[in-house]
Image (cartoon, rainbow, N blue to C red):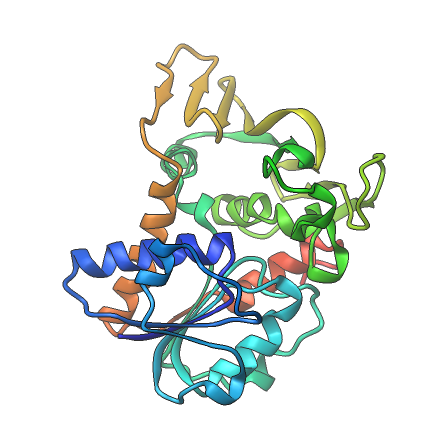
Amino acid sequence: MKVCFCGLGSIGKRHLRNLTAVARGRNLPLEIYALRKTGAALDRETEALLAGQLFGEEELDSDYDIAFITNPTSLHYAAIRAMAGRAKHLFIEKPLFDGGDYRLEALHLNPRGVYYVAGPLRFSPVIQKLGEILPGEQVYSVRVICSSYLPDWRPGADYRLVYSARKELGGGVALDLIHEWDYLVALFGFPQTVSSVLGKYSRLEINSGDLAVYLARYPDKAVEVHLDYFGRVPRREIELFTEAGTITGDLLANTVSFTDGRERLRFEEEENESYLREMRFFIDHICDRTPYSNLRRCQAILNIALGKEVL
């Protein structure tokens, strides 16, 4: 497979390593290129996985099997447009775009391709287990929180300069933490209505939003979502208030616990396992020649995250 990565930051490198691991397990030969903005030196491990580096669109070929869109969110649409006619399949890092006003039709994507927007929490053991449990539960209300302190995210880096802190690059909790809405829609479908409060409330020296709070209405339940960059104690949880009691999924501890006497579940695996399951899902669709696209779904989720009307 001939592959091109558009952007090779930390998440791009993770996907590069995982693609290589999955391909090796399936005996799929790879020829991987990276389209980069600068010629800054890569670490030896990353460089060893590449067949070459490109520093401008004029250097791109027209016959890639897969393109990975892993550059800043604000550049996604332009990168997808550039690669749509050059690659058979696309893997796009979340969120899809930095806004909801782009027209997918204008990209003229091949209906036989695989066009996948990342959402690794969908593949986490906690969310997958909740998906198995939910059909047997009467859920009245759901409460979700993702709270952490942005300056602690990347030790040794100036938090004021990272992607998340910069609105112009597509940073801010509404987009950065779109995982929560992604897995909620996977579990419950789209809500009927959503109201939201989005903005910058803390004293963090950033120009992106550091708080997003949502209240969603479903026919049979209400869902609360709280996302922030300023919580000093990291939390990433979903609570399901049911007829029988409360079910809590802790995505940091990898546990599902119950108040009705059921045994607490704990999943012993590394964080990267969810990303590997996601990569296998993507590659399997390509190898099985099964067309797939979650672009419209992810654009609709993006509209919710940005506080726009639910379609």
Q: Position of residue 50 (x, y in %)?
A: 34, 67
Residue at 56% across, 65% down: 71
The front one of 51 and 15 is 51
Q: Position of residue 299 (x, y in %)?
A: 60, 64
- Estimate the x, y position of residue 115 in percent, counting from the top left: 43, 71
Horizontally, residue 198 falls left or right of residue 147, namely right
Q: Against 267, is 28 above or below? A: below
Going 61% across and 57% down the picture, which residue do you hit? Answer: 301
Examine the rendering and report whether any part of residue 220 can be seen: yes
Point 61% across, 49% down: residue: 178
**Quadrant hosting residue 48:** bottom left
Q: Is residue 168 left or right of residue 25?
A: right
Q: Is residue 217 left or right of residue 88?
A: right
Classify the position of the N terminus by image quarter.
bottom left
Q: Nearer the viewer, residue 41 or 134?
A: 41
Quadrant in the rendering for residue 224? top right
Q: Is residue 286 above or below residue 81?
A: above
User: What residue lies at 35% left-to-right and 81% top-to-bottom?
Assistant: 64
- Residue 117: % across, % down: 48, 62
Q: Residue 159 occupies which quadrant of the picture?
A: top right
